[in-house]
Amino acid sequence: MPKLKTHKGTSKRIKITGTGKLTRSRAFGNHMLAKKGKGRKRAIKTTAVVRGAMIQNVKRALGI
């Protein structure tokens, strides 16, 4: 069976932590920020952990 290619779009968006968790950036932080509150914008800046059924899909895309 041939090797699976890494999905480059996924590899640019998701990083693997030292413990093996998958981190991603949050959406809605690029434009129209004037109408969003300060707390909301701070929350958007933080990274999030990939959870649930998406972990399986992302790992397959990354070739892990």
Image (cartoon, grey):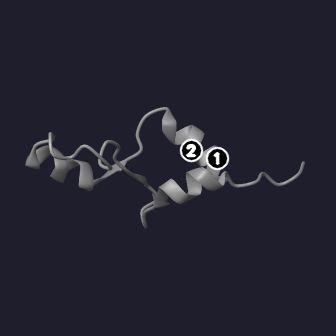
CB within 8 Å, label 2 to label 1: yes
Is any atom of residue 64 visible in this view?
A: no
- Locate residue 60, reporting x and y percent: 65, 45
- Residue at numbered disc 1: 61
Front-most of 20 and 34?
34
Q: Residue furthest left?
A: 38
Q: Residue at x 49, y 32 (%)?
A: 53
For the point 56% across and 44% down, which residue is it?
Answer: 58
Pick the front one: 10 or 57: 10
Mark count? 2
Q: In this rendering, would 35 be left or right of 14?
A: left
Compare residues 43 and 34 and report the one nearer the observer.
34
Q: Secondary structure at mark 1?
A: helix
Which residue occupies the extreme right position in the image? 1
Residue 58 is labelled as 2
- Residue 18 image point, x, y percent: 43, 67
Q: Secondary structure at mark 2?
A: helix
Q: CA distance from mark 2 to mark 1?
A: 5 Å
Q: Residue at x 48, y 60 (%)?
A: 16
**Residue at horizontal 41 percent and vertical 44 percent from the top:** 50
Where, quadrant-wise, is the C terminus in this rendering?
A: bottom right
Picture disc at residue 37: none
- Amino acid carrying label 2: it is Val
Q: For mark 2, does the 10 Å Cα neighbourhood hold few (<14), some (14 to 19), or many (20 or more) residues? A: some
Locate residue 1, reporting x and y percent.
Answer: 90, 48
Q: What crowding class fits label 1: few (fewer than 14 Cα within 10 Å), some (14-19), or many (20 or more)?
A: some
The spot of residue 38 in percent (x, y) is: 9, 49
Amino acid bearing label 1? Ala
> Residue pushed farthest bottom?
18
